Amino acid sequence: MKYQATPYLTFEGKAKEALKYYEEVFEGEVQGIQTFGEADFPTPPEADDLVMHAQFKKGELFLMVSDSFLGSTVTIGSNVSLALEMESEVEIQKIYGALSKKGTVIMELQDTFWGAKFAKVKDAFGVIWDLNYTKPQE
Protein backbone atom coordinates (compact mmCIF):
# COMPACT_ATOMS: atom_id res chain seq x y z
CA MET A 1 0.00 0.00 0.00
CA LYS A 2 1.28 3.41 -0.92
CA TYR A 3 -0.55 6.56 -0.01
CA GLN A 4 -0.42 10.07 -1.34
CA ALA A 5 -2.73 12.46 0.49
CA THR A 6 -4.22 15.16 -1.74
CA PRO A 7 -5.57 18.38 -0.21
CA TYR A 8 -9.28 18.80 -1.02
CA LEU A 9 -10.45 22.41 -0.62
CA THR A 10 -14.14 23.22 -0.17
CA PHE A 11 -15.64 26.64 -0.83
CA GLU A 12 -19.06 28.15 -0.32
CA GLY A 13 -19.91 29.05 -3.93
CA LYS A 14 -16.45 30.47 -4.73
CA ALA A 15 -14.61 27.44 -6.12
CA LYS A 16 -14.37 28.84 -9.68
CA GLU A 17 -13.07 32.14 -8.30
CA ALA A 18 -10.53 30.29 -6.14
CA LEU A 19 -9.35 28.21 -9.10
CA LYS A 20 -8.75 31.36 -11.18
CA TYR A 21 -6.83 32.85 -8.26
CA TYR A 22 -4.63 29.73 -7.92
CA GLU A 23 -4.01 29.75 -11.69
CA GLU A 24 -2.62 33.29 -11.36
CA VAL A 25 -0.68 32.76 -8.13
CA PHE A 26 0.90 29.41 -8.96
CA GLU A 27 0.81 29.71 -12.77
CA GLY A 28 -0.73 26.26 -12.99
CA GLU A 29 -3.78 24.89 -14.75
CA VAL A 30 -7.23 23.64 -13.95
CA GLN A 31 -7.53 20.07 -15.20
CA GLY A 32 -11.24 19.75 -15.57
CA ILE A 33 -14.27 21.09 -13.79
CA GLN A 34 -17.49 19.15 -13.25
CA THR A 35 -20.47 21.13 -11.99
CA PHE A 36 -23.36 19.76 -9.97
CA GLY A 37 -25.56 20.38 -13.02
CA GLU A 38 -23.38 18.08 -15.16
CA ALA A 39 -23.40 15.23 -12.65
CA ASP A 40 -25.72 12.26 -12.72
CA PHE A 41 -27.03 13.30 -9.33
CA PRO A 42 -30.29 15.08 -8.45
CA THR A 43 -29.58 18.72 -7.58
CA PRO A 44 -31.71 21.85 -7.42
CA PRO A 45 -31.28 24.24 -10.38
CA GLU A 46 -29.54 26.89 -8.23
CA ALA A 47 -26.65 24.41 -7.73
CA ASP A 48 -26.17 23.71 -11.45
CA ASP A 49 -23.19 26.06 -11.88
CA LEU A 50 -21.48 25.20 -8.59
CA VAL A 51 -18.31 23.11 -8.80
CA MET A 52 -18.83 19.52 -7.73
CA HIS A 53 -15.22 18.53 -8.46
CA ALA A 54 -12.19 20.15 -10.05
CA GLN A 55 -8.47 19.49 -10.13
CA PHE A 56 -5.60 21.98 -10.18
CA LYS A 57 -1.98 21.13 -11.02
CA LYS A 58 1.34 22.94 -11.17
CA GLY A 59 4.37 20.66 -11.14
CA GLU A 60 4.13 18.52 -8.03
CA LEU A 61 1.39 20.73 -6.53
CA PHE A 62 -1.96 18.98 -6.93
CA LEU A 63 -5.23 20.18 -5.36
CA MET A 64 -8.82 19.06 -5.63
CA VAL A 65 -11.55 21.66 -5.24
CA SER A 66 -15.33 21.82 -4.86
CA ASP A 67 -18.14 24.02 -3.67
CA SER A 68 -20.16 22.87 -0.69
CA PHE A 69 -23.58 21.45 -1.46
CA LEU A 70 -26.49 23.85 -1.04
CA GLY A 71 -27.49 24.17 2.58
CA SER A 72 -24.04 23.12 3.81
CA THR A 73 -21.92 25.79 5.36
CA VAL A 74 -18.17 26.02 5.12
CA THR A 75 -16.24 26.72 8.28
CA ILE A 76 -12.76 28.06 7.72
CA GLY A 77 -10.42 25.46 9.18
CA SER A 78 -12.67 22.52 8.35
CA ASN A 79 -12.85 23.34 4.66
CA VAL A 80 -9.78 21.24 3.91
CA SER A 81 -9.79 17.45 3.85
CA LEU A 82 -7.21 14.91 2.76
CA ALA A 83 -8.22 12.66 -0.13
CA LEU A 84 -6.78 9.14 -0.32
CA GLU A 85 -7.17 6.88 -3.33
CA MET A 86 -7.27 3.27 -2.15
CA GLU A 87 -5.94 0.32 -4.14
CA SER A 88 -8.69 -2.20 -3.30
CA GLU A 89 -12.12 -2.61 -1.78
CA VAL A 90 -10.58 -4.55 1.11
CA GLU A 91 -8.20 -1.67 1.79
CA ILE A 92 -10.90 1.03 1.84
CA GLN A 93 -13.03 -1.06 4.19
CA LYS A 94 -10.06 -1.57 6.54
CA ILE A 95 -9.07 2.13 6.62
CA TYR A 96 -12.70 3.26 6.92
CA GLY A 97 -13.25 0.89 9.83
CA ALA A 98 -10.11 2.03 11.63
CA LEU A 99 -10.80 5.76 11.18
CA SER A 100 -14.49 5.54 12.07
CA LYS A 101 -13.84 3.45 15.20
CA LYS A 102 -12.76 6.52 17.21
CA GLY A 103 -13.83 9.15 14.69
CA THR A 104 -17.05 10.57 13.28
CA VAL A 105 -18.56 9.30 10.03
CA ILE A 106 -19.57 12.22 7.83
CA MET A 107 -20.55 10.05 4.85
CA GLU A 108 -20.93 6.28 5.21
CA LEU A 109 -18.86 4.00 2.98
CA GLN A 110 -21.00 3.51 -0.11
CA ASP A 111 -21.10 2.95 -3.84
CA THR A 112 -21.21 6.20 -5.81
CA PHE A 113 -22.51 7.35 -9.17
CA TRP A 114 -18.91 8.05 -10.27
CA GLY A 115 -18.04 4.35 -10.13
CA ALA A 116 -16.25 4.26 -6.81
CA LYS A 117 -16.66 3.31 -3.18
CA PHE A 118 -16.39 6.47 -1.10
CA ALA A 119 -16.54 7.58 2.53
CA LYS A 120 -15.80 10.76 4.45
CA VAL A 121 -14.62 10.43 8.06
CA LYS A 122 -13.38 12.90 10.66
CA ASP A 123 -10.74 11.11 12.71
CA ALA A 124 -10.22 11.25 16.47
CA PHE A 125 -8.01 14.34 16.01
CA GLY A 126 -10.43 16.33 13.84
CA VAL A 127 -8.74 15.60 10.48
CA ILE A 128 -11.23 14.92 7.67
CA TRP A 129 -10.39 12.06 5.29
CA ASP A 130 -12.01 11.46 1.88
CA LEU A 131 -11.53 7.77 1.11
CA ASN A 132 -12.05 6.68 -2.48
CA TYR A 133 -11.62 3.40 -4.30
CA THR A 134 -12.26 3.64 -8.03
CA LYS A 135 -13.69 0.36 -9.20
CA PRO A 136 -12.19 -1.26 -12.32
CA GLN A 137 -14.17 -0.60 -15.49
CA GLU A 138 -16.21 -3.60 -16.56
Image: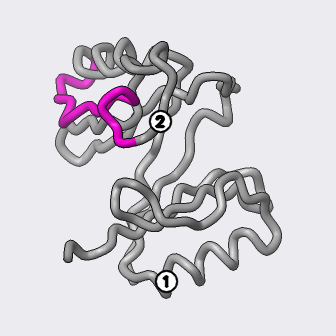
Q: Is residue 133 left or right of residue 69?
A: left
Q: Residue at x 55, y 65 (%)?
A: 110
Q: Earlier in the sequence, mark 2 or mark 1?
A: 2
Of 22 and 86, nearer the camera is: 86
The kind of residue on which mark 1 rests is: Glu
Structural distance between the alpha carbons of marks 2 and 1: 30 Å
Q: Nearer the viewer, residue 98 or 137?
A: 137
In the drawing, what numbered circle is on residue 42?
2
Above or below — where is 3 with respect to 107?
A: below
The figure's colour scheme reads one colour
Labels 2 & 1 near each other (Cβ < 8 A): no
Q: Residue at x 48, y 26 (%)?
A: 67
The secondary element bearing badge 2 is classed as loop
Residue at the extreme bottom = 90
Task: Tell me the SS state at disc 1.
Answer: helix
Report if residue 37 lies within the magenta region. yes
The quarter holding residue 69 reads top right
Q: To which quarter of the image does residue 112 belong?
A: bottom left
- Callout 2 crowding tier (Cα within 10 Å): few <14, some 14–19, many ≥20: few
Q: Quadrant of the C terminus?
A: bottom left
Answer with left or right where residue 25 lies relative to residue 53: left
Find disc 1 in the rendering and name its residue: 91
Q: Which mark is residue 55?
A: none
**In this view, the mark in front (2 or 1):** 2
Other residues around mark 1 within 10 Å, as few (<14) / some (14–19) / many (≥20): few
Q: Give the residues drawn in magenta, as a range.
A: 25-40
In the displayed structure image, the side of residue 124 where residue 99 appears, left or right = left
Query: How far from the left and from the top, in percent, is residue 77?
Result: 67, 32
